Amino acid sequence: MIFLQRVGSDLYSFFTSVRLAIVLISLIVLISLIGMFVPQRDWTREVDFVSRYGVDGYQWLKTLQFDHVFSSWYFLFVITLLTLNLLACTHKRLAASIRYYKLKQRPIPPSAIEKMEMHRVIPIAAANPSAVQEKVSAILRKHFFRVREEAGQVLADKWRWERFGIDVFHVSLLVILGAGLLTATLTFRTFIVGHKGDVVKLDKALAVRIDDFYSENYKNTDRVMDWHSKLTVLEKTQKPESVPSYEPTTTKVIEVNDPLAYKGYKFFQAAFGQDWMNSAEVTLRVTRASDGANLGEFKAKVDDGFEIQGEKIFVRIEAFLPDLDRAPNGTFYSRTQRLENPAAFVTVVDAQGNPLYPKNCCWAFANAAWKEEWKSLSAGLKLPYEIELIGMRAPEYTGIQVKKDPGQPVAYLGFLLLVTGISVHLFFKHKMIWVEVQPDRILLAGMARNNPRQFEEEFVQLINEIEKIEIEYRVLEPVNA
Amino acid sequence: MKLYSVMLFFAATLGYFLSFLCYLFYATFGTKHPNNGPVLGIVANAAPARAGIDWGRWATALAWMAVALATSGVIARAIELGDASNWIRRVFLPATSTYETFTFLAWIIPLAYLLFERRYQIKQVGLFAIGIAFILLGAAASPVFAPSEVRPVVPSLDSIWLVIHVLFMLTGIACFTTGFGATALFLRQHYNKAEKIPQARLEELMYRCITIGFVFYFIGGFVFGPIWAENAWGRYWGFDPKEMGMAIAALTYAAYLHLRIVMGWRDVRVAWLAAVAYALVLFAWLGVNYFLGGLHSFV
């Protein structure tokens, strides 16, 4: 037991040290710098990594987890330590705040009052000092001080609880970290590439229908003002006697910065454009290589194809990339989602289903330069057909991000606590005043926790008010401290 | 197109330049400074009692005038921005392009400085704060680097949180800038071993600026930023370079505050830490957009 206690107290003093906090903060700064300068895999594709760092460099990045530092074991480890550090420090500081709150203001001997940094001596000639004391107390109460008397001294203070401000702030950080943990582990997230009329099921009881979507420009310009999607949430009816069916419950036109929220789900306008990658329809011109005969133009969607009767072949569109580029390691990829260098990947099979083209072949281009390059590249393959890309179409789509995050209320609680804690710390300071009324003078001293300057103006004002009491006594002459 | 804001900012540029010259004369010739002493005497507004031209007073007066011009410039810009956006947006904070951000900071940095000056009366710091404002407006005058053309607000910036989040961040940066002025002076005096201004007072100014700046920067970045990000992108925190830049700078200032308050450090070590933190703020504000990109690259 004694051993465990010793371990416990050692751990406590280890985690309550500010030095530890500084070391951990430095580590987080260091790791974050890596994460800032090295692109992260969440928004960077492998091909981009390889083209930037080379194959070996990319391997190293992966080994060191630099491509996802913010979910690397060492970052999570440091964050965990910092959380423990914060937890321990919060406990330690909170205990100190409670002790401070329970402390009682004690009288100070007059000689000590005169030595305090913020003090004033007001000479008076009072017949009845206790009446003056009453007046002074009344003034202090008017300024929201809690006033009491002890050993003939007026002791007044206010806002003693403000020391908890920083505690609340530290607690709020823990709450926000907790919310982050909840969000990271429990959030349901999906992305809808939506076309008009699509219905997407979210769970057993809810579905969402995309009624419409459109983009709007600023008047007389081609600048986009906003993208809108009209969504209807459908909910399964609960009536036991009837057959369950989805009924519309709520409809909203969402736009960027204005999501729809329903039963914990949130729907965000996240993207808008033409769905090249998934639903492009391409037009291909096929020419026989042996005699250059034009076999015609054919239309087909991705994942589908067309038959050329006379030749007994079937051409299949495997993929369509709107902006083809080639990575240093030879793979082809789409640089962007814009239609800049469109290319279709096609395969050709004969009537028996045997491929007529070698594996990983072949591309159909629209861009003249790439067409030429492809011709020279494929010259050795002796392909029986020449296929060109001459037209393409894709339906517009709206990108809706759907999210259900149980951490959200916790996060907002954290935000509220954070702002409250900081505001308390900023606008309130525990202020204490000692007043001793003697027959010939009033001795005053004031103190504010941490920042005496915040008390200065009020202290001067209090003195002015006290100097104005002229019923029971007369101010002889003001004496500067 | 004739823009009133551009003309107002030109006038403000001239004002800052003249004010800067006066601060320079003050720093060079005005050796006396009001020694406020401990508490009670601190709200002294008395100018240094010395013969000849009181450059410090001129500097402050000109700075206020230039700030007034910049204020009207910012207001004019907000109206122009609203006009360009067909007035269909809620509130406009003219901080949606490089030009607007620079001119906005050239308004808020001197304003923050002047408010600190009223209390602390260390006018040598003004040399830095007003100088920065002048440089910002000078950079904004370049049509290549910061075209002054008004562009309507893009969809992602159409939010009340643009006003709240950006205002808090920029106010934080403005306070940090004044703080850095004090830090630089502190370090300069430390290494030159010439104490024209008591180091303790400079240190206090630095600490106060950083505390106030930290409050704005921290709340703007860790509360209002996430709330907006959640509303717009569907997540609070995405480890975007801008977010991390801000977090790093804020954490460094947090380290500074803990060393200053808990450990009681008030010497050249924390001054260096404050200088590093300010460099990180600048990197998070400008460096990220120019070198790293990410979701926050609107310019």
Image (cartoon, helix red, strand yellow):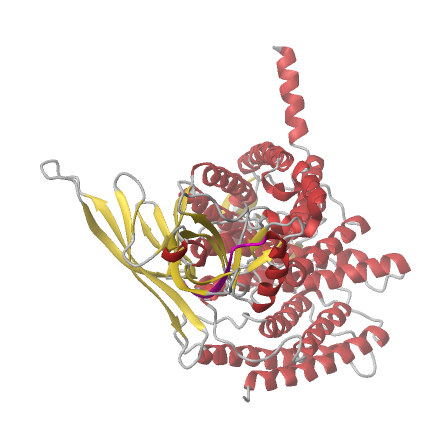
Q: Is residue B95 above or below residue B70?
A: above
The single residue placed furthest to the bottom in the displayed view is B2
From where the camera sits, is residue A14 visible? yes
Q: Quadrant of the N terminus of chain A?
A: top right
Residue A148 falls left or right of residue A447: left
Residue A370 position within the rendered picture, expressed as x and y whole percent measured from the top left:
59, 63
The single residue placed furthest to the top in the displayed view is A1
Tell me the quarter of the picture where residue B178 sits: bottom right
Q: Main secondary structure of the magenta part?
A: strand
Using the image as rendered, state which of residue B219 and residue B116 is in the foreground: B219
Q: Residue at x 36, y 56 (%)?
A: A309
Q: Is residue A384 magenta?
A: yes
Residue A205 falls left or right of residue A240: right
The single residue placed furthest to the left in the displayed view is A241
Residue A46 position within the rendered picture, expressed as x and y whole percent measured from the top left:
60, 47
Q: Is residue A231 magenta?
A: no
Q: Residue at x 72, y 68 (%)?
A: B121
Residue A24 falls left or right of residue A144: right
Tell me the quarter of the picture where residue A27 sits: top right
Q: Quadrant of the C terminus of chain A?
A: bottom right
Using the image as rendered, state which of residue A271 and residue A30 is in the foreground: A271
Residue A351 position within the rendered picture, expressed as x and y whole percent measured from the top left:
39, 47
Q: Which residues are magenta?
A: A382-393
Residue A152 position within the rendered picture, expressed as x and y whole percent measured from the top left:
57, 42
From where the camera sits, is residue A113 visible? no
Q: Is residue A450 above or below residue B4?
A: above
Using the image as rendered, state which of residue A30 and residue B24 is in the foreground: A30
The single residue placed furthest to the right in the displayed view is B193
